[in-house]
Amino acid sequence: MTEQTATRTTPYTSFFRRGRLPAILAGTLFLSPLTLPADDVVGEYRTQYEHIRVVQVTDGLRHPWSLAFLPDGRMLVTEREGRLHAVENGEKTEVSGLPDDILATGQGGLMEVLAHY
C-alpha cells in the first residue's frame, strides 16, 4: 500500500506561489504614509507586479526588528537589545517605560510591537 499525501489548495495558494505577497508586504512597508525627501531613496526595484522604492527613514539603529505605523504618521521601531523608538520625520526618540530585564541572546530580545488604537 502506498502512502498518499493530500495537497490542500486554498484561494491563496497561487497568490503565495506567484510572489505577490512579498511584493505587497514590501509595498506596504516602503510606501507607508511617511513623507520623505527624494534624497532618502536608497534603491528602486521593479518586479513583475510592482515598483518598489526603498527609502531610509532614520539611522543609528543596531538591530531594528519590528515596525508599527501609528495613525498620526509616526512609526514605532523595536531594537532586539530592548529599545523602542518613535520615528517622526527621520528623527528618532527613545520610548521609556520598558522592562529593564529584556534578555537579548540568540533569537531572544525585544521582538515585536503592535499599535492598539
Image (cartoon, helix red, strand yellow):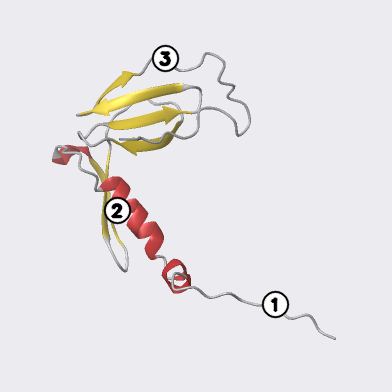
Front position among marks 2 and 3: 3
Q: Percent from the top left, x then y, of residue 55?
A: 26, 41
Is disc 1 in contact with disc 3, using a CB cutoff of under 8 Å? no
Sequence-earlier tag: 2 or 3:
2
What residue sits right under mark 1 in the picture? 5
Front position among marks 1 and 2: 1
Tell me how far mark 1 sits from mark 2, CA to CA: 35 Å
Residue 77 found in image quarter: top left
Image point 30% across, 50% down: which residue? Answer: 28
User: In the rendered image, which quarter contains the N terminus?
Assistant: bottom right
Image point 59% across, 30% down: which residue? Answer: 108
Q: Percent from the top left, x then y, of residue 115?
A: 35, 35
**Residue 34 against residue 20 in the figure, above or below:** above
Task: Choose between 15 and 117: the one closer to the eye.
Answer: 117
Residue 72 found in image quarter: top left
Helix, strand or loop at disc 2? helix
What residue sits right under mark 2 in the picture? 27
Sequence-earlier tag: 1 or 3:
1
Residue 61 found in image quarter: top left
Image point 14% across, 37% down: which residue? Answer: 37
Tell me how far mark 1 sits from mark 3, CA to CA: 50 Å
Q: Percent from the top left, x then y, of residue 98?
A: 45, 18
